[in-house]
Image (cartoon, rainbow, N blue to C red):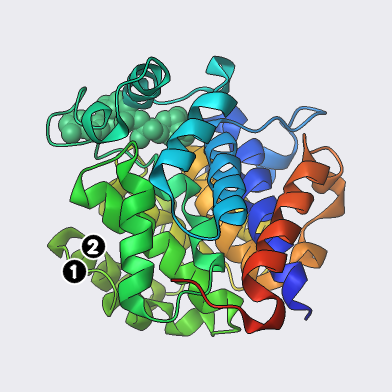
Amino acid sequence: MELRDRYRGCLLGLALGDALGAPFEGFPPIGNPADIAGRLPGTLRYTDDTEMAMGLAESLAGRGRVDPEDMARRFVANFDPSRGYGPGTVAVLGLIGKGTPWEEANRSVFPEGSMGNGAAMRAAPIGLCRFPDAQSLRRAAFLASAVTHDNPVAKEAALLIAGAVAHLVRGGEPAALPGVLEGLVSLPPYREKLGAIRRLLARPDPPVEEVVSILGHGVLAVESAPTALYAFLRSGGSYKETVLYAISLGGDTDTIAAMAGALSGTLNGSGGLPEEYLRRLEDRERLRELADLLFERFARGGGRTR
Ligand code: AR6
Ligand code: MG
């Protein structure tokens, strides 16, 4: 597969998962994924997950590195309150927009920093930057998160997603991901969740309710980033199957499907995304363009990033 197609698959897969999951936010686990397809609107509208991922991608492509001031500016410029942002992020971006430095704003709502999944949901493009080693990937994921999410738990969730994308864009095997990510994340809750994911994957078909009781499906980073990883690994490859399964877990469906969709899109490339949904996705041309900018900046000629 052409590498450019993986870049497009990553961003379009994120946005499409977000838009497909959005109508089901807050649902209990849905037993039959086929029930989802029948309840989708004509136009697939994305939410804050994609809006922030676009800001992040614009900044990475424009600056060629993680530049938190530039990211903060773009997050504020792109902010559309109708996209359903988390309340903490609304407040933090509001303060930044009024001139508070991000280093101060990011502790203004939760003094220990937000533990929400808002950093992980936008983190996939960081995995496309071809950092030369795990240490630079980690630094980049943490810094890009800190603009709004300064808690280590939120930052490691971003690292989990960015690290998975970095592995897949290089053509790495999905099955190797739990091991790769165990080498990347260090906080106990993520190490425990990766162990739980291995145990769930070893079973033929654990019920969705049990999966949710073990991994979670909430707005906290620790209750959703590992869940998205599991949805991706459980679904055996196909994008459509991955995203429908992610949505069938209920809860924060847009965000879990956005993260799982970014992983599956990177694996399958944009050619592997279901056309019947893709053509109904808002702003798909802009997303494709942004993916191409990232590709030109980071991948053409095997470019490396500081
Ligand atoms: N202590 C207690 N609760 C917390 C903490 C904390 N330190 N941090 C977060 N929460 P937020 P986001 C809870 O508001 O991460 C959209 O639907 C608290 O209930 O920082 O950007 C997206 O699609 C807080 O409101 O926003 C995503 O699903 C919530 O976690 C999600 O929202 C979310 O953290 C992204 O939200
Ligand atoms: Mg959400």
* 268 or 276: nearer the viewer: 268
Of tags 2 and 1, the one toward the viewer is 1
In whole angstroms, how far apart are the C-alphas of marks 2 and 1? 7 Å
* 299 or 152: nearer the viewer: 299
* 195 or 255: nearer the viewer: 255
Using the rendered view, name the quadrant where residue 133 is placed: bottom left
In the figure, is residue 301 to the left or right of 73?
Answer: right
In the figure, is residue 242 to the left or right of 45?
Answer: left
| Residue that carries the numbered disc 2 in the rendered image | 190
Circles 2, 1 touching at the beta carbon (< 8 Å): yes
Judging from the image, what secondary structure is the residue with disc 1 in? loop
The circle on residue 186 is 1
> Residue 102 at x, y = what percent?
31, 32
Q: Amino acid at mark 2?
A: Tyr
User: Crowding at label 2, few (<14), some or many (≥20) Cα neighbours within 10 Å?
Assistant: many
Q: Is residue 292 above or below residue 247?
A: below
Q: How many marks?
A: 2
Note whether residue 28 is visible.
Answer: no
In the figure, is residue 2 to the left or right of 35?
Answer: right
Judging from the image, what secondary structure is the residue with disc 2 in? helix
In the figure, is residue 43 to the left or right of 222?
Answer: right
> Residue 219 at x, y = what percent?
35, 36
Using the rendered view, name the quadrant where residue 242 is placed: bottom right
